[in-house]
Image (cartoon, helix red, strand yellow):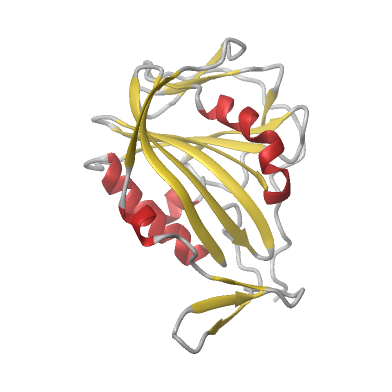
Amino acid sequence: MNKIILSAFIIFSFSVRAQTKAMTEDGKEVVLFDNKTWKFVNESDEKTLETITTNEGLFEKSKESTFLVRSKNIDAGFYYNPKSWRIVKAPGATAFVEYAFNNNSNSSIYALFGSEILPVQSLKNLKDILIPAIQRNADYFRLKNSEYRTINGIKVLHIEYSANVKGLDFEYIANLYLNGEGYSSISTYTYANQFEANKKEMENFANGLVKTEKGKDIVEVIKGPPPPMLPKKSK
């Protein structure tokens, strides 16, 4: 299960050279980068890892998000703005990722939509599975926020986090929805140095998540730059 979930949140699933890790004198693990800088492997505040707050605000999809795409697995889908986003070929071979997107204005902004038929008991349980899996597979990880939100009339888990994967810093925003069949998620991500300028666009995309009947949509996959990936390690 962890490998399936990670396909939507960690974009490097193949074997490449890991960053060097070391221990401080007080036993904390750090990652050493090629530019001679370092970070703690996990900089998340313990309270942030354990606590899910509740945002009382009501969130809705943007008026420009008019195109509905449905999950093939569960009663969920999402609306997006076809003028701002295009569907591209999903990175890697996985049944979890149903659609991958690239932003039309900034090709460094990516998004994934996926779902899985799985009897997860609660959104908190889903978080407890997801976060440790990301921590194990990222060189650096910091959970910035996790909260329950109401988006388009459904309760979702909203998370924001930072991760360094093979020397590249990324920022992520994700919304996860759970029902009796399984769960679905929308995750958007970009390079850390471009996050603040594009956060609103990413939030608008993630807020397109809705409850709807599952179905098979016929959509055109437009050729475009795939999400950033590194070459496989030579044998």
In this view, the residue in front, 85 or 89, is 85
Left or right, residue 185 beside residue 21: left
Q: Position of residue 44 (x, y in %)?
A: 45, 60
* Residue 49 visible, this angle: yes
- Residue at screen point 61% across, 39% down: 90
Find residue 28 and report its horizontal and vertical position in percent.
47, 79
| Residue for point 47% across, 41% down | 95
Q: Residue at x 66, y 65 (%)?
A: 166
Q: Nearer the viewer, residue 28 or 64?
A: 28
Q: Can you see residue 1? A: no
Which quadrant would the C terminus be assigned to in this image?
bottom right
Estimate the x, y position of residue 196 in percent, counting from the top left.
67, 40
Which of the 4 image quarters holds residue 164? bottom right
Picture layout, residue 217 above or below residue 189? above
Query: Quick one: which residue is furthest to the bottom in this view?
Result: 25
**In the image, residue 18 above or below residue 66:** below
Residue 158 position by quadrant: top left
Q: Residue at x 72, y 42 (%)?
A: 226
Q: Position of residue 119 (x, y in %)?
A: 24, 41
Query: How many discs appear?
Result: 0
